[in-house]
Amino acid sequence: MQIQLHHTHIFASDMEATLGFWRDMIGARVLFDMEIAGARNVMIAIGPGKLNIYDQPPREGRCGAFHHIGIQTDDLEALTEHMRGKGFRFQGRIREHGSLRYIMAMAPDDILVEIFQAVSENASPERRGSLKRAFAFDDTD
Protein backbone atom coordinates (compact mmCIF):
# COMPACT_ATOMS: atom_id res chain seq x y z
CA MET A 1 0.00 0.00 0.00
CA GLN A 2 1.25 3.51 -0.85
CA ILE A 3 0.05 6.63 0.89
CA GLN A 4 1.06 10.21 0.05
CA LEU A 5 -0.18 13.72 0.58
CA HIS A 6 -1.99 14.55 -2.65
CA HIS A 7 -3.20 18.14 -2.33
CA THR A 8 -4.22 21.02 -0.10
CA HIS A 9 -7.71 22.38 -0.80
CA ILE A 10 -8.20 26.14 -0.52
CA PHE A 11 -11.08 28.53 -1.13
CA ALA A 12 -10.89 31.47 -3.55
CA SER A 13 -13.08 34.57 -3.40
CA ASP A 14 -11.61 35.64 -6.78
CA MET A 15 -10.58 32.59 -8.80
CA GLU A 16 -8.71 34.55 -11.48
CA ALA A 17 -6.65 36.52 -8.91
CA THR A 18 -5.89 33.30 -7.04
CA LEU A 19 -4.88 31.42 -10.20
CA GLY A 20 -2.84 34.40 -11.33
CA PHE A 21 -0.88 34.46 -8.08
CA TRP A 22 -0.02 30.76 -8.17
CA ARG A 23 0.67 30.68 -11.92
CA ASP A 24 2.52 33.99 -12.36
CA MET A 25 4.36 34.25 -9.05
CA ILE A 26 5.13 30.58 -8.29
CA GLY A 27 4.99 28.95 -11.75
CA ALA A 28 2.07 26.59 -11.09
CA ARG A 29 0.44 24.77 -13.98
CA VAL A 30 -3.24 23.88 -14.30
CA LEU A 31 -3.97 20.14 -14.22
CA PHE A 32 -7.74 20.42 -14.53
CA ASP A 33 -10.47 23.06 -14.43
CA MET A 34 -13.97 21.63 -14.03
CA GLU A 35 -17.18 21.77 -12.08
CA ILE A 36 -17.34 19.36 -9.17
CA ALA A 37 -20.18 19.28 -6.63
CA GLY A 38 -21.73 22.41 -8.10
CA ALA A 39 -18.64 24.65 -8.05
CA ARG A 40 -15.62 25.31 -10.21
CA ASN A 41 -12.56 23.40 -9.02
CA VAL A 42 -9.09 23.99 -10.41
CA MET A 43 -6.26 21.59 -9.58
CA ILE A 44 -2.81 23.12 -10.02
CA ALA A 45 0.63 21.59 -9.69
CA ILE A 46 3.62 23.24 -8.05
CA GLY A 47 6.38 20.77 -8.77
CA PRO A 48 5.09 17.42 -7.47
CA GLY A 49 2.70 19.11 -4.99
CA LYS A 50 -0.86 20.13 -5.77
CA LEU A 51 -3.46 22.69 -4.69
CA ASN A 52 -7.16 22.24 -5.39
CA ILE A 53 -8.80 25.65 -5.54
CA TYR A 54 -12.53 25.84 -4.87
CA ASP A 55 -14.38 28.79 -6.41
CA GLN A 56 -16.02 29.99 -3.22
CA PRO A 57 -14.98 32.64 -0.72
CA PRO A 58 -13.26 31.38 2.44
CA ARG A 59 -15.75 30.45 5.13
CA GLU A 60 -15.56 32.29 8.43
CA GLY A 61 -14.35 30.28 11.36
CA ARG A 62 -13.44 27.21 9.31
CA CYS A 63 -9.65 27.60 9.07
CA GLY A 64 -9.04 25.28 11.98
CA ALA A 65 -5.35 24.60 12.40
CA PHE A 66 -4.38 25.74 8.90
CA HIS A 67 -1.41 28.13 9.13
CA HIS A 68 0.43 28.29 5.80
CA ILE A 69 1.38 26.52 2.60
CA GLY A 70 5.09 25.75 2.16
CA ILE A 71 6.67 26.13 -1.28
CA GLN A 72 10.23 24.79 -1.62
CA THR A 73 12.67 26.21 -4.16
CA ASP A 74 16.31 25.64 -4.88
CA ASP A 75 16.94 29.36 -5.57
CA LEU A 76 15.13 31.62 -3.12
CA GLU A 77 16.74 34.81 -4.43
CA ALA A 78 15.73 34.11 -8.03
CA LEU A 79 12.13 33.31 -7.07
CA THR A 80 11.73 36.38 -4.86
CA GLU A 81 13.26 38.60 -7.57
CA HIS A 82 10.90 37.06 -10.14
CA MET A 83 7.94 37.87 -7.88
CA ARG A 84 9.18 41.42 -7.20
CA GLY A 85 9.61 41.90 -10.95
CA LYS A 86 5.91 41.10 -11.36
CA GLY A 87 5.02 43.72 -8.74
CA PHE A 88 4.70 41.51 -5.66
CA ARG A 89 5.65 43.19 -2.38
CA PHE A 90 6.90 41.09 0.50
CA GLN A 91 6.17 42.35 4.00
CA GLY A 92 9.41 41.02 5.43
CA ARG A 93 12.85 39.90 4.41
CA ILE A 94 14.47 36.52 3.80
CA ARG A 95 15.20 34.91 7.15
CA GLU A 96 17.67 32.18 7.99
CA HIS A 97 17.17 29.43 10.52
CA GLY A 98 19.99 26.94 10.45
CA SER A 99 19.78 25.03 7.19
CA LEU A 100 16.55 26.72 6.09
CA ARG A 101 16.10 30.12 4.46
CA TYR A 102 12.58 31.46 4.02
CA ILE A 103 10.33 34.42 3.36
CA MET A 104 6.60 34.71 3.99
CA ALA A 105 4.12 35.97 1.39
CA MET A 106 0.40 36.62 1.50
CA ALA A 107 -1.56 35.06 -1.40
CA PRO A 108 -5.14 36.08 -2.23
CA ASP A 109 -7.75 35.42 0.48
CA ASP A 110 -5.13 35.84 3.24
CA ILE A 111 -3.42 32.52 2.53
CA LEU A 112 -0.02 32.66 4.15
CA VAL A 113 2.71 31.13 1.97
CA GLU A 114 6.18 30.21 3.19
CA ILE A 115 8.70 30.17 0.34
CA PHE A 116 11.84 28.37 1.48
CA GLN A 117 15.15 26.92 0.44
CA ALA A 118 16.96 24.11 2.24
CA VAL A 119 20.71 24.73 2.28
CA SER A 120 22.56 21.47 2.82
CA GLU A 121 25.94 22.98 3.62
CA ASN A 122 24.40 24.72 6.65
CA ALA A 123 23.13 21.44 8.15
CA SER A 124 25.09 19.87 10.99
CA PRO A 125 26.38 16.36 10.21
CA GLU A 126 24.08 14.75 12.80
CA ARG A 127 20.98 16.45 11.31
CA ARG A 128 21.87 16.10 7.63
CA GLY A 129 20.19 12.68 7.21
CA SER A 130 16.81 13.74 8.56
CA LEU A 131 16.95 17.02 6.67
CA LYS A 132 17.77 15.16 3.45
CA ARG A 133 14.66 13.01 3.90
CA ALA A 134 12.46 16.01 4.66
CA PHE A 135 13.79 18.43 2.06
CA ALA A 136 15.50 16.27 -0.58
CA PHE A 137 18.91 17.90 -0.35
CA ASP A 138 21.10 17.32 -3.40
CA ASP A 139 24.48 16.73 -1.82
CA THR A 140 27.69 16.56 -3.74
CA ASP A 141 29.80 15.43 -0.71
Image: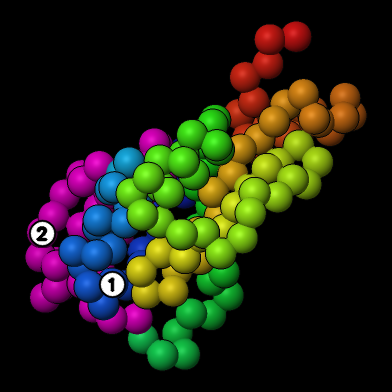
Q: Nearer the viewer, mark 2 or mark 1?
A: 1
Q: What element does badge 2 sit on?
A: strand
What colour-coding does the image apply? rainbow
Left or right for 121, reference 35:
right
Where is residue 31 drawn, in percent x and y?
20, 44
Inspect this view and state whether residue 77 appears.
Answer: yes
Q: Going 14% across and 73% down the picture, which residue do you hit?
A: 39
What quarter of the picture does the C terminus occupy?
A: top right
Q: Is residue 40 magenta?
A: yes
Task: Give the alpha-carbon distance from disc 2 to disc 1, as whole Å.
Answer: 15 Å
Residue receiving disc 1: 12
Residue receiving disc 2: 34
Left or right for 39, reference 121:
left
Dot 2 alpha-carbon crowd within 10 angstroms: few under 14, some 14 to 19, many 20 or more: few
First along the sequence among labels 2 and 1: 1
Q: Is residue 61 above or below residue 1?
A: below
69 vs 98, nearest the viewer: 98
Q: Which residues are magenta?
A: 29-58
Residue at the bottom extreme, as displayed = 60
Q: Quadrant of residue 15?
A: bottom left
The amino acid marked with disc number 1 is Ala
**Residues under numbered marks 2 and 1 in contact, where contact means CB atoms less than 8 Å apart:** no
Q: Going 41% across and 64% down the picture, which residue do you hit?
A: 107
Q: Going 13% across and 55% down the picture, which residue do you hit?
A: 33
Marker disc for residue 51 = none
Residue at the top extreme, as displayed = 141
> Of helix, strand and loop, which mostly describes the magenta segment?
strand
Q: Is residue 138 above or below residue 73?
A: above
Q: Going 29% across and 47% down the picture, which residue do you hit?
A: 24
Q: What element does badge 1 sit on?
A: loop
Where is residue 69 drawn, in percent x and y?
50, 58
